[in-house]
Image (spheres, rainbow, N blue to C red):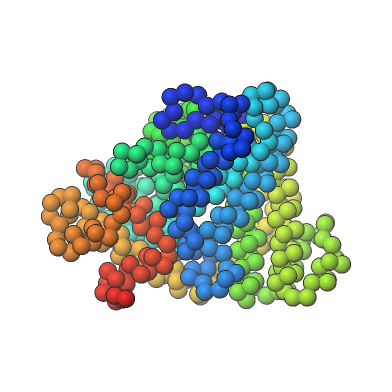
Amino acid sequence: MNWEQLLSLKRFGDTNKRLRKDQDDTRLGFEVDYDRIIFSDSFRSLQDKTQVVPLSKTDFVHTRLTHSLEVSVVARSLGRIVGKQLIAKYPDLVEKGYQANDFGAITAAAALSHDIGNPPFGHSGEKAIGEYFKSGNGKKFKDQLSDKQWQDLIDFEGNANGFKTLTETKNNISGGLRLSYATLGAFTKYPKESLPKKPSNNIVDKKYGVFQNDTSFFVEIAHELGLDKIRNDDHIAFMRHPLAFLVEAADDICYTIIDFEDGINLGLISEDYALEYLIKLVRDNINTKKYHSLQNTKDRISYLRALAIGNLIQEAASVFIDKEEQILKGEFHISLLEKCKYEAQINDIIKLSVEKIYKSKDVVEKEIAGYKIIADLLDTFITAINNNHNHSASNYDKLILLLVPDKYKETSDDLYTRVLDVCNLVANFSDGNAILLHKKIRGVDLV
């Protein structure tokens, strides 16, 4: 892999090559990506989607929207730090018009959209969709689908749904948001299809990032960016875009530190625990006089959080630069934070967060409710759309179809496409919208 190719400004449908030196510096091509994501419907729905605590009524607990904005800020910093060093290392990039801020713009846009495909009710939403097909009413479709199509459904993946959301083609409008291929490459943390499942030490194999309907477009992107295949067979599995490591690091930093902070503010983790764990991350540069002058828990935690994030940004950037040549060769197979000097402290914080936050009674009870809500919505919409396609829609089905956004009404002759579109529809609901719609469908709440 080489950086000039990896920084491709190409967008779906381009017939002429876009050159960086021809770009208007008042609004770079990569910055356009950020703008398009910000103004998209799917991004706005993140304001009412769970990050860690579902349906929280407090102002200070993060949603997917605030989390995504924060990850984007961290990713931009990482990109700029790395970009500054790469521009110095590769002067030919400067000759072609590239700047350090280009790296920040790409990582910021990719990070901004990193959760755009995630269903309501947190990560349990992904599992709920998969469970509907694996053991719910959706299992009846298994014999009508290919193995890969079926795997897409029973292992429904928010990352793949995000790629679909950013690039989907509806109503004869191609290419979705028409983001640059560099941003789409940086967005795709798992550049492979759902099968074969090959657990390995390569982080690319942890999950998958592309549904069957999107593989041909992803292959086009991979070839444009110069991503090499990681296996010599017919399966879709490519090396990661190097900047995907920075996007992943930004996400890891934010959910490790900020989810922990949410747990503290909610009273799920005691201040004594918090201080003990966070101070281990910042002891080298904490201003003890300033720290002891802070009068309340929230201010003390905020100060430590800011220091911790700053330290981890510097660490992740340092690891990236140190391993850059391995990354370009596809020989670096773990996350950046797994190689940083704070790995043990990060693991301790995550372990405590799992125990005290992610498995807390309030979180678990709402995730259970989410399973039922998602299964019912999938069943209702899939039944109505399939019956309508087969010209056997009941009056009830026809009423349900009136609730379906226009872009989903032109149904495909392909069963997999119809079903996957419904999964995308449900995944795009906010938590509150899913709950409200479920109540109305069941006749529980007509207000």
Where is residue 264 drawn, in percent x and y? 65, 71
Asked whether 22 or 10 is in front, the reply is: 22
**Quarter of the image containing the N terminus?**
top right
Q: Quadrant of residue 405?
A: bottom left
Above or below, 143 against 384 in this view is: above
Question: Which of the image's four quarters has the C terminus?
Answer: bottom left
> Along the horizontal axis of the image, is 396 left or right of 17?
left
Residue 368: give x, y in percent of width and height. 41, 70
The answer, for residue 245, to whether it is visible in the render is: no
**Image spot of residue 54 (x, y percent):** 49, 68
Q: Picture coordinates of residue 374 (x, y %)?
A: 35, 63
- What is the quadrant of residue 286 in the picture? bottom right
Residue 399 at least partly seen: yes
How many callouts does the rendering have? 0
Give the residue furthest to the left. Answer: 392
Name the residue: 60% across, 53% down.
71
Residue at the image position 24 percent from the left and 47 percent from the top: 411
Task: Return the residue found at the far right.
Answer: 289
For residue 224, side relative to residue 92 (left or right): left
